[in-house]
Amino acid sequence: MRRKESIFQKILRISVMLFVLLYSLYPIIWVFMSSFKSRMDIMNSPLKIPTQLFLSGYEEVFRTTPVLTYFTNSLIVATTSTFISVMIVALAAYVVARFDFKLKNAVVAMFASTMFIPGIAISYPIFRMIKAFGLYDTKTGLILTYISFNVAVSFFVIRSYFLSIPKELDEAALIDGAGYGSIFFRIILPIARPGITSAGIITFLGNWNDFYYALLLTGSDRSRTMPVMVYNFTSSFRGNLCAMFASMVISMLPTIVLFCLTSEQIVKSMSDGAVKG
């Protein structure tokens, strides 16, 4: 029987939660407030809440940078690569979670090993490969590169959720004459939607926020993404603090909105997948 929580314990728990929440949100709130300040306010009163809103930073960003091009590139690259990556990983996770075969443990170890390979360590062969196929400075080159990002995390998230689904569903569908492809797409995927969504969000955020390969594999505005735009303002335009903070807000806003809209699915997948994960 669970012991009743005392008032002191409840206050302590809530206080710790509020502290962690404020500690996590403070940098985002500070950047957001600073984007609406004047340069003098940022320099003289960096922690003060703005009493007057200035849009000069946002005006500078849209005037000097093709923001819509960068945003569209990020959206196309991150969405396409995430969809392809999650579908491939889901197929692999389904096989590992539902079937027994000789090299099963080796496959799991192979996915886990990708977590220990630094992205910079393989950047040179990736760059040479993209150049050799004529995909430098193209969105296709970035998509093919991003497909391999966060594969291990997605695999284990989806696999743990598949393990929580009773195998009796597969057996009943086989008795009814359904094939493995039909079982996967018509039965397993709809049930595992929270797990698939979580893996998709994790992969999407990683692809959206990637800066290193977005800079390495592109050379013009036609293919570059939002992190490169933020880098341009934090390096070439350091004197314009308003534009720098505005560019950060524009880059962060889509991911924050996406996470808020799908947070319930992520929590559900983590709690359900933890049963057998």
Image: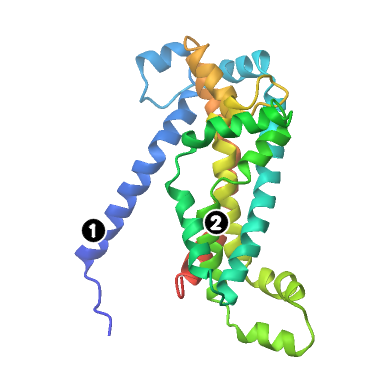
Circle 1 is placed at which residue position? 12
**Mark seen at residue 154:** 2
Label 1 SS: helix
Identify the mark nearer the N-term, 2 or 1: 1
Residue found at x 45% / y 53%: 113
Position in image of residue 257 (x %, y %): 59, 44
Residue found at x 25% / y 72%: 5
10 Å crowding of disc 1: few (<14), some (14-19), many (20+): few
Instruction: Please say whether residue 72 is visible from this viewpoint.
Output: no
**Residue furthest toward the right?**
177
Q: Is residue 265 left or right of residue 144?
A: left
Instruction: Please say whether residue 210 is visible from this viewpoint.
Output: yes
Identify the image quadrant of the N terminus: bottom left
- Gap between marks 2 and 1, in whole Å? 35 Å
Position in image of residue 206 (x %, y %): 54, 42
Label 2 SS: helix
Q: Amino acid at mark 2?
A: Ser
Residue found at x 45% / y 75%: 275
Residue found at x 27% / y 60%: 13
Position in image of residue 134 (x %, y %): 74, 28
Q: On screen, 263 above or below 206?
A: below
Q: On screen, 117 above or below 134?
A: below
Q: Quadrant of residue 179?
A: bottom right
The residue nearer to you, when weighing 144 against 167, is 144
